[in-house]
Amino acid sequence: MARNTYPFGPDSRSTNDLGTQYVPFFTHLWDLLHGRAQGDFFFNWQSAYGVGFLADFGVVLGSPLSLLVGLFPRDRIDLAVFVITALKLALAAAAMAAYLVRMRRGPRWLAAVLGASYGLCGWAIDDGAYVPMWLDGLIALPLFCLVAEWTVQSLTPPRHPGQARRKHLILSVAVVALFWVSNFYTAYMATIAGGLVLLARILTSDLSWLNRLRALIRYGVTVALGIAASAPVLLPVFQANGAAAPSPPGIFSPVPVENFIARLFPLSEGVGRSASLYVGTAALVLALSLPFNGSVKARTRVVWTLMVVLVGASFLWEPTHVVWNGFDTPNGSQYRQAFVLCAILVIAAWLSVADRTPSWIALTGGVALLVGLALYAQDNPLLTSHSLQLLALSAAGVVVVMLMLRYLRRYRTIALLAGVALIAAVGAELTLSAVVVDEQRSKVLSAPAVPWGRHQQALADSVEAAAGWPKYRVDPGTSTTPNDPVLLGGQGAGYYSSLLPETLNHTLTGLGFGWSGYGRASYELQNPVTDAIFSVGATIGPYAGITRADVPPLVTVRPKPLPDAPKDSTAYDMQERLLGADVYDIPVYKAKRAADGVFTLQASCRPGLTVYLYLPRVDGEARFNTANWMPLAAARRPGINTSSAMVQLGKVPASGLIAAELKVKAAPNNFLYQGAMGCLDSARLTKAVAALQANGAVAVQAGGHSIHATLKPGTTGVAVIAAPHLPGWRCSTDNGQLKEASNYGGLLAVELPGPTRKVSCDYRPPGLELGLAAAGGAGLVTLLLALASLLWRRRRQAS
């Protein structure tokens, strides 16, 4: 509300990928839940002309809370994602509070305060709030710690004679499986954190060394069974990730220690540049007081102090850093595991306050340590104005309240007022820090997507008015986000996902499509040849105008399999190859440098043809015969992070002369190649489309993850489906045996064994069958172990 961002104001809160990737996928989930999507949980017919969906679901939408999106109107998906995000923060806070009181009895209201400090920690607000799927790991961590606590308590002698030791095996496995399905990435970090907390718990317990080893083994078995139970989603995600367009590996550069320490303090900001470690001054003071707190056993103080120091140090040492990040250094924010240290600080704070409020000696030691850290980092650029002032004010207030609770607790009114004051102070500081962090982050990371409004509704209405699936596709374009096909409806080229297949990227790039995000975001291409290849019968302009075209059906028949393309093939060659007809004239042009970064291209084509230019690795502008400048949109590291699409320059004049101008901002050496320019003959294209229509399917039905086509009697050759060839497709002819689909220049195809009437193809996510087998095995083993434990317990009780 203070920032005036959605839903409390007009400013967008869709930082980075929130509005361009996650909100559209939540919209697609809404469509699936309401029966409006083209596809199902296995396959998505709408994005990139047809891609698998189960892996995207597992990465972005796996949390059960995602299903709440179905309760909101479709034009309020932004609100649904906001509510789900806030709910995840609240559940993370509640889960931590529940774990703290289970770990060690203490004042529940203090556990709630520390839970809120964890749920609104710096990582949650700075890194997780605009990547809602990561917040499942924030919830998972205290629950994995609770699984570890159940393991310890199952080996601890009961407090009362005859009391049974409950192992919670089935529940523990279910908890692990749930969060590995919800978001395996942060669940992986939370699993390591749970193991470290278990290690600290058994080292500070009175268990024998044999029981300590048994606790570690039990936790490991529980985690292994839980991960195996999540395999039906997890393995398809891993398979899809392995086949995705790769991004360059990140280069780990540890931040200076003073930057690391500065992020412990309120009002600090350094998204993408440092670890977000803020947990509130109250939790920080209590955690720092633990080493000096004589009310806590010395062994507990030593173990947990070392835990804080060693976990923090592991973020700054490359070998352990890559372990935290799944043996990879991510691009962008490199300290995505920071919530682990936030959790450990909160647990350390609880250990210092749970049994008894810290003494003045412990608080003095904690404050002295805090002052030392503040002096060390006082001039750090990651501290915003008033950071240290707020730190000092809050620390003084915490000390006063703690002393009142310890030495004046017999005066109930005073103790109550002190508790209320602490709750109010923590809430105010967490809120103020969130406001400042959000404001500062907006200066570094943009919010390119705006909430649903009249413009998006007009585009969606145009898509619905032009709908004709599966007779033909309606491409909504990519004018608002790369994921407009699932946000607005339709079936286009747009698709932004970290799981976009590398083979699909190569196919689209070869045809002249543009991309960004290291090849993980594909964009529309305004070209009638590719429209014919992919059966795009209607396109929606950025102002909701509808352009229709006569295109072949989704399934066409070609005379024979397609040979491999020559290595020197241009995008125009690749388009003609898939179309099955020559429709371009490729002129030889002459290039001249007119000025620094300015070039002229001169060529000739037959009058009336349409001129196209394809310079995929160039950032700049182009124009034809002094017309308006057209952007070549490889604006960020051309050929590495982005690649521009083929652009239409205009019609060849009566003179037949082509004069194109280029303004080049960035480009590799020798970027001008013969074959970059092509002249399209629309008459030949019309003839080619008519030929494909004559030999195409007479009827096409598309299921959730299948497609069926009825061909003309006696059809032979190769049936080509206007969808990408991806692993997982199996096809049959005339209801025969399913076989792996053929590849027709990157398109899905079926070689007809003879005269054929029907062609059917079915998609199964790669890894699903093995995942189901693994989950079944894990479930069986879990039940057998639980049954064996129950029988053993009854036998001991009987004896």
Image (cartoon, rainbow, N blue to C red):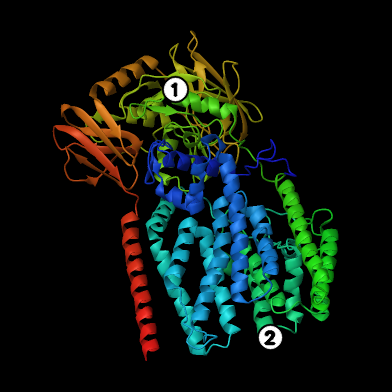
Residue 399, given in percent of the width and then of the height, sits at 82, 71
- Most foreground residue, 572 or 787: 787
Which is nearer the eye, 785 or 229? 785
Residue placed at 48% from the left, 23% from the top? 462
Q: Residue furthest top?
A: 654
Q: Is residue 724 visible?
A: yes
User: Relative to residue 140, is residue 290 depicted above or below?
Assistant: below
Q: Residue at x 38, y 37 (%)?
A: 45
- Residue that badge 2 annotates: 297
Q: Is residue 579 left or right of residue 718?
A: right
- Badges 2 and 1: C-beta atoms under 8 Å apart? no
In this orientation, does residue 520 appear? no
Residue 704: where, in percent of width, then height? 34, 40
Distance CA(mark 2)–CA(mark 1): 72 Å
Which of disc 1 and disc 2 is earlier in sequence?
2
Q: Secondary structure at mark 2?
A: loop
Write the residue at 34% across / 17% down.
686
For label 1, the SS is helix
Instruction: Tell me the residue that label 1 is attached to.
Output: 465
Q: Is residue 315 above or below residue 539?
A: below
Position of 177 compared to 284: left or right?
Answer: left
Among the 4 quarters of the image, the one containing residue 558: top left
Residue neighbourhood size for the residue with mark 1, other residues' Cα within 10 Å, grouped as few (<14), some (14–19), many (≥20) = few
Name which residue type carries label 1: Ala
Question: Which image quadrant: the C terminus?
Answer: bottom left
**Image point (77%, 64%), residue name:** 281
Q: Please tell me which residue lies in front, 301 or 474.
A: 301
Q: Amino acid at mark 2?
A: Lys
Question: Does residue 118 appear left or right of residue 33 in this picture?
Answer: right
| Placement of 349 over or under 259, stated as above or below | below
